[in-house]
Amino acid sequence: MKFRDKVIIVTGATSGMGMAIAEHFAREGGSVIISGRNEQRGEELASHLKKINDQIIFIAGDIRTPQTNQLLVETALLNFGKIDILSANAGILGLGSVTQVSPDTWQSVFDTNLNAVFYLCKYAIPHLLENENGGNIIINASIAAFKSFPNHPAYCASKAAVVALMKQMAVEYAPKIRINAICPGPVDTPLLWDSAKAFEEPEKAVADAKEATLLKRLGTPEDIAKLVCFLASEDSSWITGTSITIDGGILNV
């Protein structure tokens, strides 16, 4: 088991990619703190994961606040004595053009997609640095960091910003901590279908995205989880400060 004796915090764990990532870490023996705003789904996930691995704790909370992120770190330290890996996955869209998006929506997108990552890293990094073997941070960004999509200005801007934050932190905290971002393309999750609402025909937009990939399929949450677990493991020990696209080749089209 690759993550036995590792303590992992997974945010955005109550749906989609974050849920699959949490399960992969649990199956590989990790002690996992999972977080999300949906308390019912979080408790159900924790109950499911405990059948695989009893070292699972769910913390409900709004990661847009510093306090929730501080609580995640404190919970890991109190229960497991350390933190080894952060997997930051929470994300929202805030659909609408620049002239349509309200200031509150814009702020909420940046609070979720960027500021929450800053808060989690701010409170966790001092403890990662204390580890003999350092630590590991994987940030779930998006191909939207590199490619524009109609009616996604807040999402595109926030994902580009979090990639920039990743690169800065990777330089700042090397060689002790490895920090990378993953940039998924169209993955079959609720967020993809919400994103498709920006188009006149949402179902056609999803079908077109599938067809636009070189591999002619949507990604799955499990595809993403496997990449995250690779980046979190010693198998990727010479990879840091990079953003890895996992998009079925769609950026080449």
Image: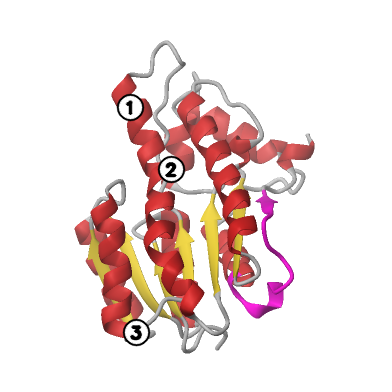
Q: Are marks 3 and 2 in contact (CB under 8 Å)?
A: no
Q: Which residue is mark 3?
A: 81
Sort mark 3 into few (<14), some (14-19) or many (20+) by Cα contacts within 10 Å.
Answer: few
In the displayed structure, would residue 248 be above or below residue 5?
Answer: above
Which residues are drawn in magenta? Answer: 232-246
Are discs 3 and 1 less than 8 Å apart at CB?
Answer: no
In contact (CB < 8 Å): disc 1 and disc 2: no
> Is residue 12 among what the camera can see?
no
Q: For the C terminus, which image quadrant?
A: top right
The residue carrying mark 2 is: 113
Helix, strand or loop status at disc 2: helix
- Of the image marks 1 and 2, the number of the one nearer the N terminus: 1
- Count every numbered label the image shows and give the total: 3
Pointer 1 residue = 105
Residue mark closest to the camera, 3 vs 2: 3
Residue at 44%, 43% (x, y): give it.
114
Q: From where the camera sits, is residue 72 visible?
A: yes
- Which residue does the image show at 33% across and 21% down from the upper left? 103
Determine if the magenta segment contains residue 237.
yes
Disc number placed over residue 66 in the picture, else none? none
Q: Toward which corner of the image does residue 171 lie, by quadrant?
A: bottom right
Front-most of 99 and 204? 99
Cα distance in 3D space between marks 3 and 2: 28 Å
* SS type, badge 3: loop
Q: Position of residue 6 (x, y in %)?
A: 47, 83
